[in-house]
Image: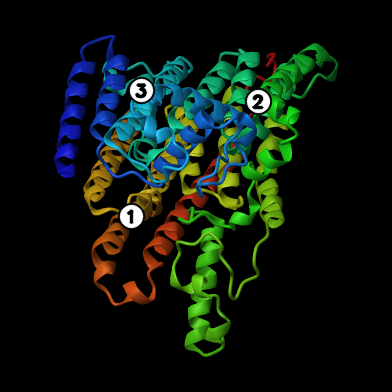
Amino acid sequence: MRIKWVECAALSVMAALSVMTGGGSWFLALALGVTLLKCLLIPTYHSTDFEVHRNWLAITHSLPISQWYYEATSEWTLDYPPFFAWFEYALSHVAKYFDQEMLNVHNLNYSSSRTLLFQRFSVIFTDALFVYAVHECCKCVDGKKACKELTEKPKFILSVLLLWNFGLLIVDHIHFQYNGFLFGLMLLSIARLFQKRHMEGAFLFAVLLHFKHIYLYVAPAYGIYLLRSYCFTANKPDGSIRWNSFSFVRLISLGLTVFLVSALSLGPFLALNQLPQVFSRLFPFKRGLCHAYWAPNFWAVYNALDKVLSVIGLQLKLLDPKKIPKASMTSGLVQQFQHTVLPSVTPLVTLICTLIAILPSIFCLWFKPQGPRGFLRCLILCALSSFMFGWHVHEKAILLAILPMSLLSVGKAGDASIFLILSTTGHYSLFPLLFTAPELPIKILLMLLFTIYSISSLKTLFRKEKPLFNWMETFYLLGLGPLEVFCEFVFPFTSWKLKYPFIPLLLTSVYCAVGITYAWFKLYVSVFTDPPVGKTKKQ
């Protein structure tokens, strides 16, 4: 049944493509086409995040604000910042016209057809902000690469890469979350900085932080860039800062903006003397080093090495089976991970590693300014560094780097190459989120369509330059095919399935971690090697 929906989705894609070649309405056609696809995905599998957000609707609708961050009837307690809680509160007043029962805190795991439709359509509706943000980002694209064909224009390619992003489609519209409008806020703030509307960009990012605190990952890039390019109004001829150009008025205006947004968000809970409780929900360090599905980062490789050493130690009888934590050897799907051979990792260690990884990009943004594109590179490096070394990182956080990288991909061939490696491996790492059989052809088909389009369109855009991949990169990306075949079609029929059920997750996380680490390193190389721009111009 669901496979028929996939066929319908493919037809909708073809219909959208036929419409958008008709003239100036191509962007609207792209947006409507992907909206139709989202509607066709409504009957698909949804994760426990569906119940998470239903519970938050119930909490904010039926309880006073003083109980929002204390309510614990469900295990899915409210752990997003206050603006998102108010967002759920606003949605709940529409939800009551669909099904009042979904707003009962004690109706755990409640699901009805009307509840499903409301929650699915609420995600689709709020994506309107994301569509607008993509439209604004397209205005920031360098138009030097003029092409006769519409489909070869950078703006068109960027629109497809963002609006039809595979990761966002499956995470929001199958798995279920509200990332679309949040990324819309981030992309819109980036667009405003490109347009030199710094105060608007700062305001939008401050608002975003109080919707979802994961965006703290990229806060250093915003802070340094705004200080360097907005508070200092001029440079010396060699590109260094003209210290006497510092504007206290601009610094105060930025600080006041952040303060007012924070006061609006946290003020009510400060008045209730509940800030410690709110922060304990936002930063739950007791959850463990890795998320249930291992994000493909440095700690996934670390965990994998620990498992391999544990197996070898058992085989050689160097380890006592009774002293090995059962969870560490039976499944990768655990939140608390106890290392057997290697030293266990603390939140402080991950913080230090993250700061060390971020510092070079911050250094370059300050001492080697490259304009808004330099800021965007720094933002992506902050996101990737936090993803690779952070504590309890969600695999979905890779989208925080992939989506902004889309903007760079249509500007330079080198950035296009990095984007393709990052997006292909990052998107594939999301496959374990959709583990049900009916969704298998859906995720494979959607990823193939997006990946083939991304590679072919960017190759066409930069056809006069050197190839986007070398032989090693090509070999690595092609290796994702055999990996998928083994994990989905071979491993389930082996005897290893009962003894080592974590192997598919381990292989996926480690293999993708290699590609993401490579993209991170390659982007850092480009930051260090690219010359500063606009040395003699005001920022």
Q: Which mark, by number, is residue 24?
A: none
Residue 88 image point, x, y percent: 49, 29
Residue shown at the point (50%, 75%) measured from the top left: 326
> Image quarter for residue 118?
top left
Residue 452 image point, x, y percent: 27, 39
Q: Secondary structure at mark 1?
A: helix
> Observer-nearest residue: 276 or 14?
276
**Residue at which label 1 appears:** 480
Estimate how packed mark 1 is, as few (under 14), some (14 to 19) or many (20 or more) residues with alpha carbons within 10 Å: some
> Image quarter for residue 278?
top right
2 or 1: tag closer to the N-terminus: 2
**Residue at which label 2 appears:** 265
Colouring scheme, one of rainbow, by chain, secondary structure, one colour: rainbow
Q: Assess whether mark 3 and mark 1 are in contact (beta carbons under 8 angstroms).
A: no
**Residue at which label 3 appears:** 97
Residue 367 image point, x, y percent: 73, 31
| Kind of residue indicated by mark 2 | Ser
Residue shown at the point (31%, 21%) measured from the top left: 31
Residue 94 image point, x, y percent: 40, 22
Quick check: 293 left or right of 208?
Answer: left
Estimate how packed mark 2 is, as few (under 14), some (14 to 19) or many (20 or more) residues with alpha carbons within 10 Å: many
For the residues labelled 2 and 1, the Cα–Cα distance comes to: 44 Å
> Observer-nearest residue: 419 or 121?
121
Label 2 vs label 3, nearer the camera: 3
Quick check: 346 left or right of 191?
Answer: right
Q: Secondary structure at mark 3?
A: loop
Quick check: 302 left or right of 35?
Answer: right
| Kind of residue indicated by mark 3 | Tyr
Q: Assess whether mark 1 and mark 2 are in contact (beta carbons under 8 angstroms).
A: no
